[in-house]
């Protein structure tokens, strides 16, 4: 579990990005960048090395699902764990997230404990698969 892991937080609301970033910092992850939609996120992911993506589902230009699909279709990015964030826990979203290869799913508003638990679970799964 390395503290220098690089996170990309994708959300069209800057307040939400700030909150997630703040929570990640409290958990111990200080290396965090932000993107305001899937288009920006994708270009950042292609241009630089990231270890973990936390993405909102409902965004303009490119939704979280479209971003997830693009990540999973890119041979250089498909290993990246993507944690999906949404305001409403719709069953079809959860199913779609799982089918599309999301590493996990979290409903806002969430606490530091929930985020930490999700991130750790995902990291353990990845470590086991590696």
Image (cartoon, rainbow, N blue to C red):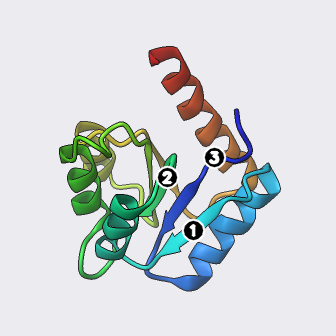
Question: Which comes before the other along the chain, label 1 or label 3?
Answer: 3
Separation of disc 1 and disc 3 at Cα?
11 Å
Residue positioned most to the left? 73
Q: Residue at x 49, y 52 (%)?
A: 50
From the viewer's perspective, tell me whether residue 119 is left or right of residue 37. right
Query: Which residue has dot 1 on it?
Result: 33
Query: Which residue has dot 3 on it?
Result: 5
Pointer 1 with pointer 2, Cβ within 8 A? yes
From the viewer's perspective, tell me whether residue 4 is left or right of residue 107. right
Q: Residues within 10 Å of mark 2 (few under 14, many from 20)?
A: some
Pointer 1 with pointer 3, Cβ within 8 A? no
Q: Residue at x 24, y 81 (%)?
A: 61
Q: Dot 1 lies on which element?
A: strand
Question: Which comes before the other along the chain, label 2 or label 3?
Answer: 3
Question: Which comes before the other along the chain, label 1 or label 2?
Answer: 1
Q: Dot 3 lies on which element?
A: loop
Quadrant the N terminus occupies = top right
Query: Which residue has dot 2 on it?
Result: 50
- Frontmost residue, 107 versus 59: 59
Q: Residues within 10 Å of mark 3 (few under 14, many from 20)?
A: some
Separation of disc 2 and disc 3 at Cα?
8 Å
Q: Picture quarter containing residue 37? A: bottom left
Give the answer, above or below, for where 111 lies relative to 114: below
Q: Residue at x 76, y 59 (%)?
A: 25
């Amino acid at each position: 579990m390395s503290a220098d892991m690089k996170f990309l937080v994708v959300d069209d609301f800057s307040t939400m990005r700030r909150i997630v970033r703040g929570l990640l910092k409290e958990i111990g992850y200080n290396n965090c960048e932000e993107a305001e939609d899937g288009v920006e996120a994708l270009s950042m992911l292609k241009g630089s090395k990231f270890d973990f993506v936390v993405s909102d589902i409902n965004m303009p230009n490119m939704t979280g699902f479209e971003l997830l699909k693009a990540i999973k279709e890119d041979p250089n990015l498909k290993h990246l764990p993507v944690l999906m964030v949404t305001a409403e826990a719709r069953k079809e979203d959860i199913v779609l997230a799982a089918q599309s290869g999301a590493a996990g799913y979290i409903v806002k508003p969430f606490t530091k404990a929930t985020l930490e638990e999700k991130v750790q679970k995902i990291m353990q799964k990845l470590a086991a698969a590696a």
